Amino acid sequence: MSRFWKIALVVVAAIVVVGIGLRVMGGGKPAGRTAAAASAGAGEADKDPVPVTVVAASRQDVPVYASALGTVAAMNTVTVSPQVGGQLLSIDFREGQEVRKGDLLAQIDPRTLQASYDQAAAAKRQNQALLDTARSNYQRSNSPQYRQYVSKTDLDTQRNQVAQYESAVAANEANMRAAQVQLQYTRITAPISGIAGIRAVDAGNIVSAGTVLVTLTQIHPIHVLFNLPERDLPAVREAQSAGTPEVVALDRGDAHVLAGNGTLDVIDNQISADTGTFRARALFDNADNALWPGQFVNVRMKLRTIGQGVVVPAQAVQRGPDGDYVYVVQDDRTVKMQAVTQGVEVDDSHVQITAGLKAGERVVTEGQFRLKPGSKVNALAPGQTPAPPTDAELKAAQQKKGRGGRRPGGGPR
């Protein structure tokens, strides 16, 4: 092949390649316009308002509480035991019964101790008779009529005999009192008012001094012991100096109040070096027996009240990498992220805001996951649902969808 033909083939091939390239570049422009149109359509879609629930921040008095897990403890606990031994004749209480101080709880066979008392009484009567005789003899011998006929030695002996019998009678009286005390111990009475527990021994058994019969617990009033962190000590002491802080006992789930109107009774005199906490004790009248010794409760003690604090629902506060924030709805129906500082919990569903928010500003409480700064929103009240779209809105949405399904040139994709 000649050199001319080789050059001609190269030129033809170059023309074909250029033509194909121009064809490809020309066909890509409609696709680019379609992508731009799609982006524009998406941008328009992004401008649709997002339905969210909005609540205005309010002002109210916010009570400040110290909370802890507490243990109910009886005001007094007494283990009842006999002070003398013998056969247990009867049990005179019912287990679980509320008894009063002085009520009869049990009786021990008194016959042995009664005999001891009677013996001491008989000895006293015997010595009392001897004492009366000795006194008569001494008085007669010491009278002016007989003194000159009685020697001084006999007179001293009679006087000493009177003293001897007086001492014997005094000893007999002491024995009688001791026997009477022992006899009284056969009647076991309640030393305090309280609830009787489960008895430890049955009637008919031989018991000795110190045998446990039953335990009494006083529950009117009743104590609740709890620990608080040492950082709360200044606030607790300040509240105590200002008055008697109110204490409430709640159940383990913090859902129901078991006992209210409690008061702070005492603060322990030292902080535990192991736990960094201090002990405190509250006092409840427990008139309805809602608190029981050994029960675990949640303690809430009111320390002070913050006047007119800014309060919002707790779910409005979100946590981000830079701290807590809320979405605030602006006048143009768009939202902005507002950094806030949380204070104390107001109740189970609200929280106080110490900085970053003013009363009256509207915050988003539901629907935050669909928002970003600048998003337009449809603000709804709590419990309100968005209104159904009108016919005009449905028609406009269908037209928008139709435009998005065709190429700019009018031809199908």
Image (tube, grey):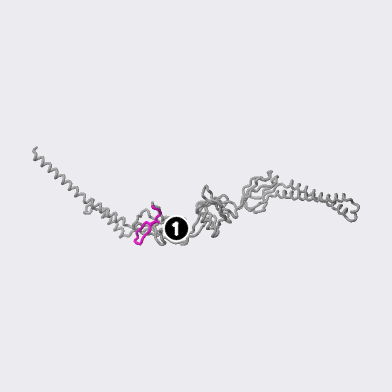
Could you tell me residue 78's position as x and y percent? 63, 50
Residue at the extreme right: 149
As for residue 338 lying within the magenta part, the answer is yes
Callout 1 crowding tier (Cα within 10 Å): few <14, some 14–19, many ≥20: many
The residue depicted at 19 percent of the width and 48 percent of the height is: 25
Residue 24 lies left or right of residue 330; in this view the side is: left
Please identify the quarter of the rendering in which residue 10 is found: top left
Give the percent coordinates (x, y) of residue 4. Answer: 8, 40
**Which residue appears at 47% of the width and 61% of the height?**
307
Picture coordinates of residue 38, whole percent (x, y): 27, 53
- 112 lies above or below 147: above
Question: Label 1: which residue?
Answer: 352
Range of the magenta residues? 322-339
Tell which of 162 and 282 is nearer to you.
162
Relative placement, left or right, of 289 versus 52 is right
Helix, strand or loop at mark 1:
strand
Image quadrant occupied by the N terminus: top left
